[in-house]
Image (cartoon, rainbow, N blue to C red):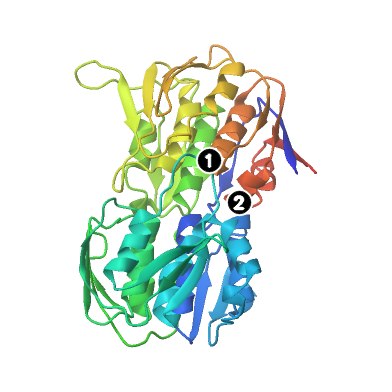
Amino acid sequence: MASFIVEGGHKLHGSITPQGAKNEALQVLCAVLLTKETVVIDNLPNILDVNNLIDLLASMGVTVEKLAKGKYAFTARSLDTAYLRSADFLKKCNKLRGSVMLIGPLLARLGEVTYAKPGGDKIGRRRLDTHFQGMVNLGATFRYDKDLLAYRFLGKHLKGSYMLLDEASVTGTANIVMASVLAEGTTTIYNAACEPYVQQLCKMLNAMGAKISGVGSNLLTIEGVSELHGAQHTLLPDMIEVGSFIGMAAITGSELRICKVGYRDLGIIPDAFRRLGIRIEVDGDDIIVPAQPHYQIESFLDGSILTVADAPWPGLTPDLLSVILVVATQARGTVLIHQKMFESRLFFVDKLIDMGAQIILCDPHRAVVVGHDHTRQLKHNNMTSPDIRAGIAMLIAAMSAEGTSRIDHIDQIDRGYENIESRLNALGAKITREE
């Protein structure tokens, strides 16, 4: 496996443009299965998770044509049903978390699907009850096949229904929406996730002929149609990359322009960094992070310690808490990081503590960070990336540290960040990939 060798202490300068949104890409790629006509998707990031899903679609019988960098045409005119029952299909699904969103479109298109438990980041329990119950609500049945170690879904005639989701699951909402657009009658989804990724999926489906209303709210209404047609769709910029670049600029004391960020779709993210004392200026659709020798963490109005916590949209995305935690290690002040949604995402902080960060891990969900105020640098360390977001947090820490650090298992970072070392090296970072 590959590793990053990171020489810390170098300031960044210049401008960088975020890639297309990874989480949106995984949703809309699955949606191409809902029509026999061609769907063109632009701004797809060249990352492992997206490339693996594109390869899986091609194996399923989807015609894939690369039109330009990041722009592909997908035509699912006929699907290889024999392959969809094969061990290779189950094996590939098992390695890719986003493949869970194949269930809805395949069930709507074919009336049946066999699906292995998905892989992905090991960040605690990531249950699939919301996905499965949504399919049951639409009239499907499922059972677990012990021989195949897979779930088998049947739903030849899906019918719309009212459902109240037990959690506002992003991928669960996407799966149910994709199954509902071709179901008979009207489906109402309450407590639906309303992240920009889900909004984008709904907009693409409506462009394909679906009838989805309530987009952007937690109450979606889907009037089933008999078929969908082709469409063109462009991904949003990746908000997690935007937040990562803000964090890199702040912790290294650098001035950086982040271009074409899709500012109105960033929600609370800029304000979350501002609460750490980081200056963020907006110039059109660009963000400018000025060089700051110090940044002061705010307190709550009553003087108590600031808490930064994740929450369903429009709350703060959990994917950025690891970055915010690292950035706080060099702030002036103290902050409580509360990771509510995943129970193993803070376990990488022991590596930061080894680097000299002042962090108290209270439990699997909470960590108190006492910032150094840039009075002393983090020390270099050897680390292993456990998941995508911890991996980028480790990279940010290493970029700010004294000396040279090593990060192993960087295929985790490659799953979510396109060509990250060359893009950062162009800004002045010193990162070498070692195979």
Tell me whether circle 1 and circle 2 mark residues in contact (CB < 8 Å). no
Q: Residue 416, can we see it?
A: yes
Up the image or down, 244 lies above or below 89; here it is above
Up the image or down, 319 lies above or below 348; here it is below
Q: Amino acid at mark 2?
A: Arg
Considering the numbered disc 2 on the image, is that residue within a helix, a strand or a loop? loop
Q: Amino acid at mark 1?
A: Arg
For residue 91, what is the image quadrant? bottom right
Residue picked out by circle 1: 389
Q: Residue 234, can we see it?
A: no
The location of residue 414, given as percent across then percent down, is 64, 49
Considering the numbered disc 1 on the image, is that residue within a helix, a strand or a loop? helix
The location of residue 117, given as percent across then percent down, is 51, 57
Tell me the quarter of the image containing the C terminus: top right
Local packing at callout 1 (Cα closer than 10 Å; few below 14, some 14-19, many 20+) is: many
The location of residue 15, given as percent across then percent down, is 56, 46
Q: How much space separates mark 1 and mark 2, taking CA atoms?
A: 10 Å
Q: How many marks?
A: 2
Tell me the quarter of the image containing the N terminus: top right
Residue picked out by circle 2: 415
Farthest-out residue, right = 435
Identify the residue at image location x=26%, y=78%: 159
For residue 332, what is the image quadrant? top left
Residue in front for this viewpoint, 14 or 249: 249
The location of residue 76, given as percent across then percent down, is 53, 82
Residue in front for this viewpoint, 371 or 409: 409
